[in-house]
Amino acid sequence: MNPLVKRRIALGSLFFFIGLCFASWAARIPDIQAKFDLSEGQLGTLLLFLPIGSILGLPIAGWSVHEFGSRRVILTGSFIYAISLPLIGLSPTTWILVMVLILFGLMGNIMNIALNTQALDLEDQMGKSILASFHGLWSLAGFTGAGIGAAMIFLDFNPTQHYLLVMTLSFVIIFLAHSYVVKEKKRDDSGGLVLKKPDNLLLRIGLIAFLGMMTEGCMFDWSGVYFKKVLVADPSLVSLGYVAFMGTMASGRFISDRLVQRFGKVPVIRVSGLLIFLGLLLSVSIPTLPFATLGFFIVGFGVSSIIPVSYSIAGRSKQFAPSVALALVSTISFFGFLIGPPMIGFIADLFSLKISFALIAMNGLGIALLASIRKDVFYPSQVSETL
């Protein structure tokens, strides 16, 4: 087998392992809540510490990957991330759990930057777009993790036992993949902690990713609520919109690379933005079960390409090292993921949930417009590849 293909399989398995760990944690949140007898408000406060860890990890990730290389960061960070999962279940107090969740979030984002840096290096060597397929494996792991979680609950495994099983599986994946994680080509780019202003290209890519992640976060958290309260769907069908969205988001990432190869990165981003707009507009304007499901189905396809294609463009910045550029874009986009869901609730309280979703539809138009601004304002030599 071609060594690059072996490396691609190994790297894909590491993306899968990261997604599996995160989904496994999420599947047992209700059990964690019951263990510590937390109210809804207390649980909400507790869950904030994971994104806090993620934010703390962003500048560290850019610096560590630039200084030590993605291989060393991946191999060290993988074990720490896998071990931190059962530590969640073993935490005897909420204060210790808070510290573990910060570690879990921090290492998750460090691994995110390191793996994407490694993937971009492999993409350059293979001479074709492959980044979206790795993100597709992360999404597929989400489904797998949810299924394993349901099985563990059915078999009456407690969270610690469940997490130890996932950690063991993670160790096997890391062991089999480690020899195919190589040192990427060193570039003499700007490094250091990510505490600097992004250039115009990265700022625009960051805003596109920000709008994409805001839409993604809203769909994750509010799809079921929309189907329950706006469509008044039967309880057995409340999750239909979420499943439609997640299914096309995951599958869309496996075909996104082919679309990029054929049509280019910028056109794919433009069309993705329009799909988000049209899908949500359909769901809001015809709020019936068939049309809303179709709308969420379309939104999933639109969202699927935004982050991997944005990362692929950012990683080729002429002003920053790939790891630093990815961390900068991730920092901007992550805030979209954080503020989107609560913003939906705030607007829904003032007006209605339909109006909230209508406003989120405008994210799609924003993405399409940002990808359509005159290219030569930025990097004329890169107009065929970037914005």
Image: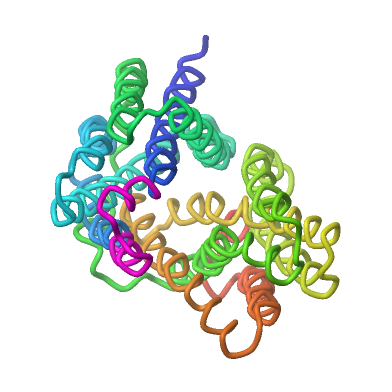
Rendering coords of residue 155 (x, y %): 44, 25
Residue drawn at (66%, 83%), measured in percent from left and top? 352
For the stretch drawn in magenta, the main secondary structure is helix
Q: Which residues are magenta?
A: 30-48
Of residues 89 and 354, the one drawn nearer to the viewer in this rendering: 89
Residue drawn at (59%, 36%), measured in percent from left and top? 128
Q: Is residue 76 left or right of residue 299?
A: left
47 in the magenta segment: yes
Query: Taking the image as drawn, is residue 373 in sight?
Result: no
Coloration of the structure image: rainbow
Residue drawn at (63%, 74%), measured in percent from left and top? 360
Rendering coords of residue 90 (x, y %): 19, 38
Rendering coords of residue 89 (x, y %): 25, 39
The answer to whether 364 is drawn above or below residue 50 in the figure is below
Rendering coords of residue 66 (x, y %): 24, 47
4 in the magenta segment: no
Query: Taking the image as drawn, is residue 353 in sight?
Result: yes
Q: Is residue 236 left or right of residue 205?
A: right
The answer to whether 257 is drawn above or below residue 205 in the figure is above
The answer to whether 59 is drawn above or below residue 82 in the figure is below
Q: Quadrant of the C terminus?
A: bottom right
